[in-house]
Image: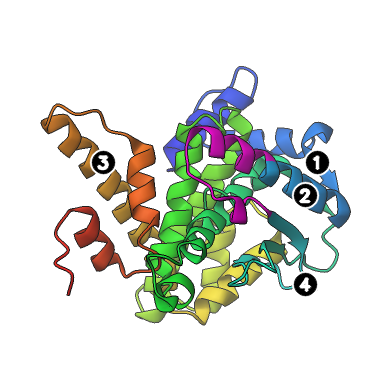
Amino acid sequence: MVDEQQRIAAEIVPGGKPGPGIIAEAISLLENDPARKLHGTDALQRWMQETSDRAVAELAETQFDIPAEIRTLECMIAPTQEGGIYYTGPADDFSRPGRMWWSVPEGVTEFDTWRELTTVFHEGVPGHHLQIGQAVVNRGLLNEWRRQLAGTSGHAEGWALYAERLMEQLGYLDDPADRLGMLDGQRMRAARVVLDIGVHLGKQRPDGGGVWDGDYALEFMRDNVNMNDSFVRFEVNRYLGWAGQAPSYKIGQRIWEQLRDEAAQRAASLGETFDVRDFHRSALALGGVRLDTLERALRGEFDGR
């Protein structure tokens, strides 16, 4: 992941070459680019909404079946100041739409679009909003449990990470700066897996300085994430108190990617053309399920029990 970041950073820095220091150099250039800055939460909210609306409209035309009921996604600044970014699903009758919330820490007034573009895709479309909203729409096939209640972290968060990489593959992150921002988020989530295992299993620190503790966890994340320190602290505190959730994201992402690749290979072996839109339609039609159920269903092994 670091190697990939270095290669992309070298595309941003004039005359740059992959190697130590190139990522920090690229980030310094981007952070001083006024064209990539948002000032204030009002500007952040407008940019989130415009970016989300454009993604919904374009992806509905080319990549996904997006029902009319979920083509509205509201982007909101949360009333709290904790540092998290999250999604809440629509009401059962769609009287309240799905919403993307940004909890901005006190004192944070500037935001970088290159960092956060992938976040909008993660929380919105094709991420959480598409997956969760699609299940709510599917009243004719799914019971209330599968539509509203049965979400698991591996299934939902795995899909959202899958959606981030998918948007890169679809050309929405062709700007090297936007790809660097996506990779920074992916690296953070990989680092959280290491942190989770280290802290909660009492492992030895990779620097040889003893057993993992909260202070080292914060130092480790700061070394691996290029984000505002308020957000880094929020993430560390979150995972110090939520054992096992960080690995579930990455396990889920891996399973979603494996299932898509297996479906493409099966189609090729039969001499058929693989249609990723059909794959996504079948996968999202299942609603909230466990990862093992998802695997059986998409591999054609589900026996109905």
Q: CA distance from mark 2 to mark 4?
A: 15 Å
N-terminal-most mark, 1 or 2 = 1
Magenta segment: 54-72
Confirm whether residue 211 shows in the render: no
Disc 4 marks a residue whose amino acid type is Gln
- Front-most of 251 and 270? 270
Are discs 1 and 2 less than 8 Å apart at CB?
yes
Q: Earlier in the sequence, mark 4 or mark 1?
A: 1
- State the separation of the CA atoms marked 2 and 3: 35 Å
Q: Is disc 3 placed on a helix, strand or loop? A: helix
In primary-sequence order, the first of circles 1 and 3 is: 1
- Disc ID at residue 261: 3
* Sooner in the amino-acid sequence: mark 3 or mark 4: 4
Q: Amino acid at mark 2?
A: Phe
The answer to whether marks 4 and 1 mark residues whose Cβ atoms lie closer than 8 Å is no
Quadrant of the snapshot with the C terminus: bottom left
Which of discs 1 and 3 lies nearer the camera? The answer is 3
Task: Give the residue at mark 1.
Answer: 37
Q: Amino acid at mark 1?
A: Lys
Q: CA distance from mark 1 to mark 3?
A: 37 Å
In this rendering, the answer to whether 56 lies above or below 137 is above
Identify the image quadrant of the N terminus. top left
Q: CA distance from mark 4 to mark 1?
A: 20 Å
